[in-house]
Amino acid sequence: MSIKSILDHKISRKSFIRGMPAVAAAMAAAPAIQLAQTSAAVASEPETRPGYYGAPRTWMWNPNANTMVDTSKWKKAGPYTIGFSNASISNAWRVAFQHGVLWSAGQHRDEIAHLLVTDANDDPSKQIADIQDLISQGVDILLIAASTEDALDSVVGRATEQGIPVVMVDRKVKTPANYITYVTASDWALGRLEAQWLCETLGGKGNIVMLPGIAGSSVAEIRIKANEEVFSKFPDIKVLEKQYCDWNPATGKSVMAALIQKHGKAIDGVLADSALQGYGAIEAFLDAGYKDGEFPPMTGGDVARMYQLANQHNIKMVGIDYPTSMGITGIETALDVLKGISVPDKVEVSFQVVTSPGADTISVKGDRHLLDHVSMSDPGDLSPSNGLPAGYNPSTFNPDYPK
Amino acid sequence: MSAITVDLRRNRLLLSYLIVAVLLVLLAVAGGLLSDRFLTWRNIGNLFQQLIVLGMVSLGQTFVVLMGGIDLAIGSLVGAITVFLANFLEWRPDLVWLALPLALLAATAVGALNGLLTVVLRVHPLIVTLGMSSIIFGATLMYRKEPGGSVPRAFADIAYAKVGGIPLSAIVLVVIFALAGLWLQRTRTGRSIYFVGGDREAARLNGLPVDRIVVLAYALSGLCAGIAAIFLTARTGVGDPRIGAALTLQSVMPVVVGGTILAGGRGGVLGTFLGVLLVTMLNSLLNFVNVSSYYQWVIQGLIIIIAVGIHTTRRRY
């Protein structure tokens, strides 16, 4: 990712410069992650063009050294054919993410001749065949969101061996040598911040339930490990249960309903790593007769509905979106590789910490408040951190891209 | 009279094969017109490399359907065997020679157990195999929730290896299908599978060991699932309890598209082979023309219904 693309798409030049003190502070305070509140002013900046604004939690923010990958050996003349193998579009996050990829390809028509898209329906076996099909079609580069980190490892490695560069986006495979770079947001930071916020909100004592995503996907497993790092510092926080919810609202609701049956009011806090199952969990509490003010504090992010429900029922929450805009960054990163521009071995896309009113804790403060992040009239399945043009509506968005 | 019936039956089957073959040619021509890379050697090799897993589970399903049953435990069984293999090979990568026969043995045993339960309990195979599927899946998840394990590179290569430019897996598949076809046509036991599927009571009255044949058909289905799991493990390099989830229903599609009657007794492995080719080529083509996989589902569903519709309508004459 080039500096230019950061300035063009991720954050405005002004907020980037304004955010710099925060970056410097975070770097100075390494290895502890410090979240300065300086960017609160940034949040109110009017969003007049694509991309969203705020604290630059990108690879610039990495408190450690970045490893830059020299891509000159992949350099070739355009226009390019890009193969995009998506794990699925089985939830609102994945739909917005794919919209980002398609829209971004449309913005780079001068460089991209074809964007070939496959969808594996979350089936690793199908995704292997998809990737082989894309290779057969002579793609110049593969952009892959892996359905599982292990099962795709081998086929991704074989693509690289055949001389096809691979950029992973959203979900990677096991062996780093098998791909050039991984476009992501820091699941480690996300997992730590959400767990830290929950533990501090509970005063360091209480029973919680964990509702992670899909078993075996790198994103879900890293977040769980990051959560557990934090829990290990709070001996009085007890994890009652950990149940995978597949990032699916219906599963989140039924799992939470069963947990409420089992543990009732003993549940002091809910750690959902995404709003996809998080809003399902809120609905389960509503069905169980919880009144406004009785809800345990919850974590989430990713889709508008959870923020809206939290606002409506006065639920304490912290939300960190795993930005769907990484689809846009994925295309830009793939283009950088083909143009021979160096990329960091991990491209972090900026995320923002969102808190409900009065929910800031000692170490986790909101970059923006709930209603600055979403409005009550947004469609429930809107991914707020989408980076797409203003007025984006996932149900009607139909981006034109080079097919 | 019976000679004429047999002849008619054979013609019907030939007609089914012909329809699928024509569809295949149409699909290939359409693919060639829509993309200049579809009919390249590279992509055809790639297509044949993708056949083995669906091919093996569909062959297993063919035995069971011909015999008048159905096996809905295939997907879970494949997942369980991949988990067994990947974990075993992670523990002792040098014992591939032991792991593979063990995997096949275990898969065959589970299949035989399915058959035994339908025979002993006299419960519809739909229920027995569905229950077995749930048991296998649950037991596998108890052992391993997430994909994991690993395989030695030499083992992984069997899924990608080529002999004289032809994928090894495709050669294995063709040989197994040919043997299965010969066995069904030319041996007493093979033919008795048709007989049991056609009319179980008549077969019993004729002194055929019906129960043993039922168990045999399910055992063969298990064995096929085991072979599919070996190639799947080699392809992915891990064991994944969920990886077979879609395979159960997918295994039925080539069977019915290929003209094998769900009620049993009629059909054959050539039709299944053509069906496997058709489904694999169709999915690949839809990828080539950049069509959402939702359409792939719709089109697959349409093909099943139309195929079964054609076969049953013709039977009414």
Image: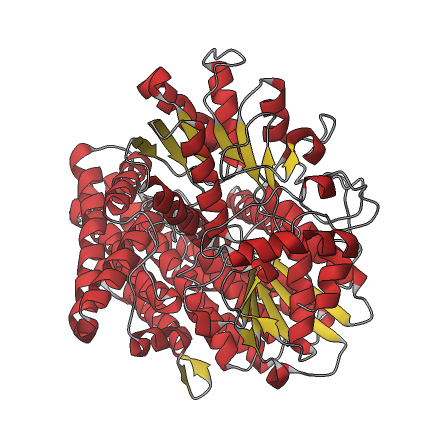
Q: Quadrant of the C terminus of chain A?
A: bottom right
Position above or below: A351 against A169: above
- Of the 4 image quadrants, the one containing the N terminus of chain A is bottom right
Q: How many marks?
A: 0
Of A403 and B178, nearer the camera is: A403
Say which residue appears at 27% left-offset and 37% top-offset: B128
Instruction: Give the image location of residue A304, x and y in percent.
Output: 64, 33
| Residue A356 as seen in the image, left or right of residue A175 | right
Q: Nearer the viewer, residue B142 or B45?
A: B142
User: Which residue is at a point 49% across and 15% down the rendered structure image?
Assistant: A287
Can residue B235 be spotted in the picture?
yes
Q: Is residue A100 left or right of residue B188?
A: right
Residue at the extreme bottom: B164
In the foreground, A5 or B308: A5
Position above or below: A331 against B306: below
Measured as percent of width and height from the top left, residue B293 is found at 60, 52
Q: Is A126 displayed left or right of B209 in the figure?
A: right
Q: Is residue A139 among the parts visible in the rendering?
A: no
Q: Residue A309, located in which quarter of the rendered image?
A: top right
At a point 17% along the width and 63% down the height, the residue shown is B102
User: Vertically, is A50 above or below B138?
Assistant: below
Q: Residue at x 38, y 52 (%)?
A: B244
> Is residue A11 rendered to the left or right of residue B79?
right
Q: Which residue is more in the foreground, B95 or B161?
A: B95
Q: Report the coloring of the rendering.
A: secondary structure
Q: Quadrant of residue A68?
A: bottom right
Give how far across and how far down residue A273 sits, in percent.
48, 40
Where residue A241 sits in the image (x, y, percent)? 32, 32
